[in-house]
């Protein structure tokens, strides 16, 4: 099935935000993204403005509505700043859309073509979890900046990159009892298969628990973990997210780097706040892992709060930011992989205890 719907990778992640200019500035100065294109009233667009941000192979789009009756404004008021569109790059958007709808996807926008002097882009959209959508994008016949109607902003001073190079995975939170339904959706509609399944025994602390299934395209270009809450003594991170976001949606994105130490140092210097890890975690690491196969200095990792996990295929280094907006919803993971295709199962307890400490500070545990 996956051969019938080839997905080349993530095309863009579009956020609906309250102030696109300020959001773009934050991602530029804190995360090291370049603002490469813009559209808005200056270019004949009356209802919105959008900034396109790029670093390595990652493309984010910050979009804000300009009128009180805008659906973008309504979305941001209801959910806060969050991901609206997880767009996929495909070789043929019309074919991908037709096949998805034939398999049971709900159509949002049938294929449409946008053209300018740089060529044409074909797009089509389907509904996903909550108010999130997936847009199929074929830009194989386009050489301009992002989409027709966008103008370059490269005259601005280039940002100082932090070494982020691609989207490793995009994690969504869904309501209790919905995980299996959405896992089946991605299997049926996009031909994805299950890479991992974590039950509440694997992902739990003394107080909270959750369950997760990881769907992927079989190639590693797209990985979509799906989380749902599980029974616990107190409110889980998934429940907190759903309380503040209001519906299922994207909880965090993992951004890959080839040098996590340099990336995290620079992001910290830029003002990005990360979850803290107690020193006891690193005391345990020294005996828990086989350090002869890990090219990292545990003292440096402890200084920066970077987590390590190891499996039969290799190891990975990872760290998680705090929420990047006022509502405790969207956050980021920075990850460096060395063979491992896992998600840091050995770090789950330490990570969720760190999240619980933040929840407790907010009064939401």
Image (cartoon, rainbow, N blue to C red):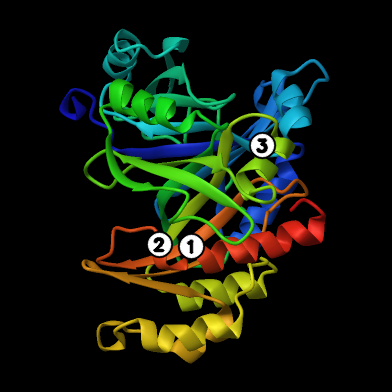
Cβ–Cβ under 8 Å for marks 1 and 2 = yes
Return the residue at label 3.
242
Residue at (68, 54) in percent of width and height = 323
Residue at (30, 11) in percent of width and height = 98
Q: Residues within 10 Å of mark 3 (few under 14, many from 20)?
A: many
Measured along the vertical axis of the image, is residue 349 above or below residue 5? below
Label 3 – label 2 distance at C-alpha:
23 Å
Query: Nearer the N terminus, badge 1 or badge 3?
Result: 3
Measured along the vertical axis of the image, is residue 168 above or below residue 300? above
Return the residue at label 1.
348
Label 1 – label 3 distance at C-alpha:
20 Å
User: 245 or 46: nearer the eye?
Assistant: 245
Cβ–Cβ under 8 Å for marks 1 and 3 = no
Identify the mark at residue 345; answer none if there is no mark: 2
Residue at (66, 66) in percent of width and height = 272
- Observer able to see residue 17: no
Query: Nearer the N terminus, badge 3 or badge 2?
Result: 3
Please state the horizontal and vertical placement of residue 185, each as a whole percent of the image.
Answer: 37, 24
Q: Is residue 86 left or right of residue 357?
A: left
């Amino acid at each position: 099935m996956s051969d019938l719907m080839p997905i080349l990778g993530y095309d863009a992640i579009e956020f609906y935000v309250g102030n696109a200019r300020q959001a773009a500035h934050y991602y530029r100065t804190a995360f090291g993204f370049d603002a490469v294109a813009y559209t808005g009233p200056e270019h004949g667009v009356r209802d919105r403005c959008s900034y396109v941000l790029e670093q390595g192979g990652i493309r984010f789009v910050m979009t804000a509505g300009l009128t009180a009756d805008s659906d973008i404004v309504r979305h941001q008021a209801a959910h806060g700043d969050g991901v609206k569109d997880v767009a996929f790059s495909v070789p043929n958007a019309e074919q991908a859309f037709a096949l998805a709808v034939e398999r049971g996807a709900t159509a949002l926008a049938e294929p449409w073509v946008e053209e300018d002097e740089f060529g044409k882009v074909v797009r089509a959209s389907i509904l996903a979890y909550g108010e999130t959508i997936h847009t199929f994008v074929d830009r194989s016949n386009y050489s301009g900046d992002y989409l027709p109607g966008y103008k370059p902003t490269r005259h601005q001073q280039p940002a100082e990159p932090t070494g982020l190079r691609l989207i490793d995975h995009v994690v969504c939170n869904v309501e209790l009892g919905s995980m299996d339904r959405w896992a089946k959706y991605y299997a049926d509609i996009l031909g994805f298969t299950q890479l991992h399944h974590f039950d509440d025994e694997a992902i739990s602390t003394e107080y909270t628990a959750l369950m997760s299934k990881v769907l992927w395209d079989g190639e590693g270009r797209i990985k979509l973990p799906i989380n749902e809450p599980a029974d616990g003594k107190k409110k889980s991170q998934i429940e907190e997210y759903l309380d503040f976001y209001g519906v299922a949606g994207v909880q965090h994105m993992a951004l890959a780097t080839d040098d996590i130490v340099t990336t995290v140092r620079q992001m910290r210097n830029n003002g990005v706040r990360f979850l803290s890890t107690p020193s006891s975690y690193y005391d345990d690491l020294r005996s828990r892992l086989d350090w002869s196969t890990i090219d990292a200095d545990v003292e440096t990792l402890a200084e920066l709060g970077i987590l390590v996990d190891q499996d039969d295929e290799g190891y990975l280094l990872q760290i998680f930011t705090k929420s990047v907006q006022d509502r405790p919803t969207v956050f980021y993971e920075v990850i460096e992989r060395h063979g491992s295709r896992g998600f840091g199962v050995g770090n789950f307890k330490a990570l969720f205890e760190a999240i619980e400490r933040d929840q407790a500070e907010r009064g939401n545990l």
